[in-house]
Amino acid sequence: MHQAPVGMAMRILFVDDAPDTGFLFAMAFKIEGHSTRLATNGTEAVQAVEQEMFDAIVMDIEMPGMNGWDATCQIRRLPNGLRVPIVMFTGYTGGREHQRAIEAGANDLLHKPMLPDMLLSRISLLVAN
């Protein structure tokens, strides 16, 4: 099962090349009762999804090595990545990112900066649907 029942603890994969960002969100999610696995690039994210199941994935777009677009496409081809909600997360506001995120297989795209509780609320809505 990829989705935690509403109100239950979620297992979240948080992918961002800025370690401080990952740590901040992981701590905020932990306070709310959720566990987080951190990855710093797309390759690590794909490997994590090959190894275990998550209730949600938060994916930065611009990262060294494999970017978030390519990682999302690859994750969607994996058995553990078929239905898991993926939220792409970026500081870029060029205008076409949302459409590209959907085309890559993401469920949504949110823009940085964003507070952890706002991101967690969005994730919870996606997991509930």
Image (cartoon, rainbow, N blue to C red):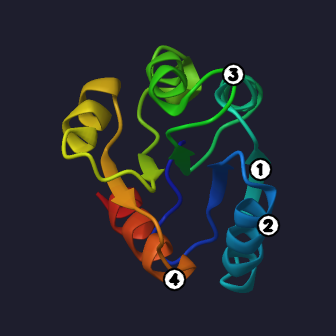
> For the residue labelled by badge 2, is the local secondary structure a helix, a strand or a loop?
helix
Left or right: 63 in relation to 69: right
Q: Earlier in the sequence, mark 1 or mark 2?
A: 2
* Residue underneath mark 2: 23
Give the residue displayed 43% in from the left and 79% down from the top. 118
Q: Tell me the residue that label 4 is attached to.
A: 117
The mark closer to the camera, 3 or 4, is: 3
Q: Earlier in the sequence, mark 1 or mark 4?
A: 1
Residue 46: where, in percent of width, then height? 66, 24
Which numbered disc, 4 or 2, marks the residue that appears first in the sequence? 2
Task: Give whichever of discs 3 and 4 has the lower sequence position.
Answer: 3
- Mark 1–mark 4 Cα distance, whole angstroms, equals 18 Å
* Left or right: 23, with 73 as reference point: right
Describe residue 124's horizontal placement relative to residue 42 as left or right.
left
Q: Give the spatial CA distance, label 3 vs label 2.
A: 20 Å
Instruction: Mark 1: give few (<14), some (14-19) or many (20+) Cα within 10 Å.
Output: many
Q: Which circle marks residue 65 in the picture?
A: 3
> CA separation, marks 4 and 2?
14 Å
Q: Are marks 1 and 2 in contact (CB under 8 Å)?
A: yes
Within-10-Å neighbours for mark 3: few <14, some 14–19, many 20+: few
How far, Cα to Cα, is label 3 from label 4?
A: 29 Å
Q: Residue at x 77, y 50 (%)?
A: 38
